[in-house]
Amino acid sequence: MELNLNRHIPKDFVDTVTAHLLMCRAKSENPRIKANSILAIAGPSGAGKTTNTYAIAEALGCQVYPVQGSDLVAQLEGQGTELLVKALRDAAADTESLMPIVFIDDGDLGGLGTNPNITGTVNGEAIKGFVMAWADNPSQIKIDDGKSPQRIISLPRHACMIITT
C-alpha cells in the first residue's frame, strides 16, 4: 500500500504504524485474528513520533482521539482513568474512520506513578492495569476502583491505541 504522505517519513516507521492499524481493523472485524491492540513507539523527543503518526493516520483515513500522558499523572485519583474511558468511548462510537486511534502522547507508562507529596494522585500501576485489561478485550472497558463494584462498559467498535514515549 502506497500512502500519499506529503512528507518524508522513514519506511520502517510507516510500515510499523500502517501494519498496526490494519491489523487492529482486521481484529475488529474478526475476533479470531490475533493482533496487538497497543503499539508503543519509543524515541527521543523531537524525533517526529507524534507528527508522523498523525500524518499516517490522516493518509489512511483514521481519526485520532488524543490523550496527553501528562494528563494521566497530573489528575486526582480516578480522573486519569476517566480520560482514557472517554477517549475509548469516543473512538468506539466513530463509525466513519478506517480505524479510530486512541493516541497517548508522551505516555511513558513505565514512568507513571504517584506523587508522594500529594495524596490521591494517580497510581501508575492502576493506569497500566486499566490499559492492559482493555488490550486483552478491546470490546469492553473494565473499571475497578477498589471501592465500588466493578463497572463494565461494552464498546460498539474496537479502537486501537498508540502510545509514544
Image (cartoon, rainbow, N blue to C red):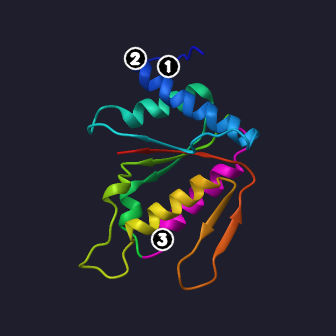
The kind of residue on which mark 3 rests is Gln
Evaluate if marks 2 and 1 touch, with contact meaning CB atoms under 8 Å apart: yes
Q: Amino acid at mark 1?
A: Leu
* Label 2 CA crowd tier, 10 Å (few <14, some 14–19, many 20+): few
Up/down of 141 relative to 12, above or below: below
- Residue 96 relative to residue 117: left or right: right
- Label 2: element kind: loop
Which residue is under mark 3?
79
Query: How far from the left and from the top, in percent, is residue 61?
Result: 63, 30
Q: Which residue is mark 2?
A: 8
Q: Report if residue 97 is visible in the image.
A: no
Residue at which label 1 appears: 5
Q: Main secondary structure of the magenta part?
A: helix
Q: Residue at x 50, y 31 (%)?
A: 17
Q: Residue at x 26, y 37 (%)?
A: 44
Q: Position of residue 60 (x, y in %)?
A: 60, 27
Q: Which segment is the magenta one?
A: 77-96
Give yes or no for contact between labels 3 and 2 (Cβ–Cβ under 8 Å): no
Q: Residues within 10 Å of mark 3 (few under 14, many from 20)?
A: some
The residue at 35%/31% (across/down) is 48
Residue 111 is marked as none
